């Protein structure tokens, strides 16, 4: 899919924002464009973009994150480089935001300039398999809290319903009604459904705008 210059990914804990952020950043870079990816998740540092730092460096993708990310002294601090995401309009910016309204407050620092430029996507990543967002109403409640905290309305939805390596095609197809309800309530489109390689081939002719993504190496190593 074509992207605006700034792509913001928000959603509840475990929705899969980081994997999708990495996927989009690599897509943009492969098209020949300069891109930076920013890890602004100051609430839940477990699966972080920094876990893929070496991979990003080899791909020529700039990574912006806290110096403490992924260490034993992880603290809720943001680097000053985050302001380059709005100041340097010559490159794309992919923003991985925290998992609830508290995490979205970090985005609030950049929101005025993002809205002013008006060249952004604010994408809601949803996963029906997560315990606190199993129904559309619960998911919408979380997304509305995020919108309120960061002061930017969502423009689209990414359906990332999965159970990691245990995902089956039926799990993904069963989530279509769920995502459709979220789309209807929030009046924004479903722009993408993301799946891993093990189910992609079976679903590629059944679900529109299907994208194959890779799980972070850390998730495979730890069996998540």
Image (spheres, rainbow, N blue to C red):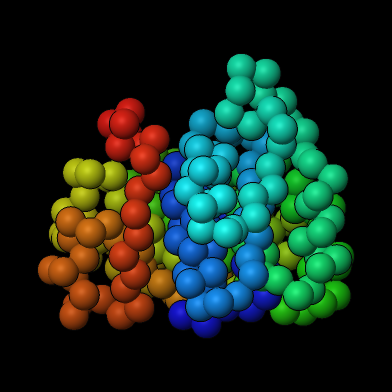
Looking at this view, is 93 or 128 the one in front?
93
Q: Position of residue 94 (x, y in %)?
A: 62, 61
In percent of the image, x 69 and y 48: which residue is there? Answer: 64
Residue 90 versus residue 85 in the image, above or below:
below
Looking at this view, name the residue that lies furthest to the front. 58
In this rendering, the count of numbered labels is 0
Q: Position of residue 63 (x, y in %)?
A: 64, 50
Looking at this view, is 92 or 140 the one in front?
92
Looking at this view, name the residue that lies furthest to the left. 202
Q: Is residue 161 visible?
A: no
In percent of the image, x 26 and y 76: which residue is there? Answer: 207
Q: Position of residue 170 (x, y in %)?
A: 16, 59
Q: Would residue 68 appear left or right of 108 to someone viewing this image?
A: left
In percent of the image, x 52 and y 82: which residue is there? Answer: 2
Q: Would residue 191 appear left or right of 215 to someone viewing this image?
A: right
Q: Would you identify the image quadrant in which residue 45 lies?
A: top right
Residue 86 versus residue 1 in the image, above or below:
above
Q: Quadrant of the C terminus?
A: top left
Q: Is residue 158 visible?
A: yes
Q: Would you identify the image quadrant in which residue 98 lies?
A: top right
In percent of the image, x 18 and y 80: which residue is there? Answer: 205
Q: Would residue 48 appear left or right of 89 to someone viewing this image?
A: left
Looking at this view, is 52 or 134 the one in front?
52
Residue 203 versus residue 139 in the image, above or below:
below
Q: Would you identify the image quadrant in which residue 9 lies?
A: bottom right
Q: Position of residue 38 (x, y in %)?
A: 66, 52
């Amino acid at each position: 899919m074509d992207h605006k210059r700034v792509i913001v990914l928000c959603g509840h804990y475990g929705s899969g924002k980081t994997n999708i952020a990495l996927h989009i950043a690599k897509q943009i870079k492969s098209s020949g464009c300069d891109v930076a990816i920013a890890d602004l998740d100051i609430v839940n540092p477990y699966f972080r973009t920094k876990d893929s730092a070496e991979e990003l460096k080899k791909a020529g993708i700039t990574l912006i994150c806290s110096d403490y990310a992924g260490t034993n002294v992880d603290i809720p601090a943001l680097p000053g480089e985050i302001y380059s995401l709005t100041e340097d309009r010559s490159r794309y910016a992919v923003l991985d935001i925290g998992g609830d309204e508290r995490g979205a407050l970090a985005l609030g620092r950049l929101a005025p300039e993002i809205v002013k430029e008006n060249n952004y996507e604010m994408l809601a990543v949803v996963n029906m398999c997560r315990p606190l967002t199993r129904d559309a109403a619960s998911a919408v409640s979380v997304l509305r809290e995020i919108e309120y905290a960061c002061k930017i309305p969502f423009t689209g939805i990414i359906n990332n319903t999965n159970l990691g390596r245990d995902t089956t095609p039926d799990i993904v197809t069963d989530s279509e009604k769920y995502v459709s309800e979220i789309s209807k309530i929030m009046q924004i489109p479903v722009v993408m459904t993301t799946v891993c390689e093990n189910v992609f081939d079976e679903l590629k002719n059944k679900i529109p705008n299907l994208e194959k993504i890779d799980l972070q190496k850390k998730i495979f190593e730890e069996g998540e």
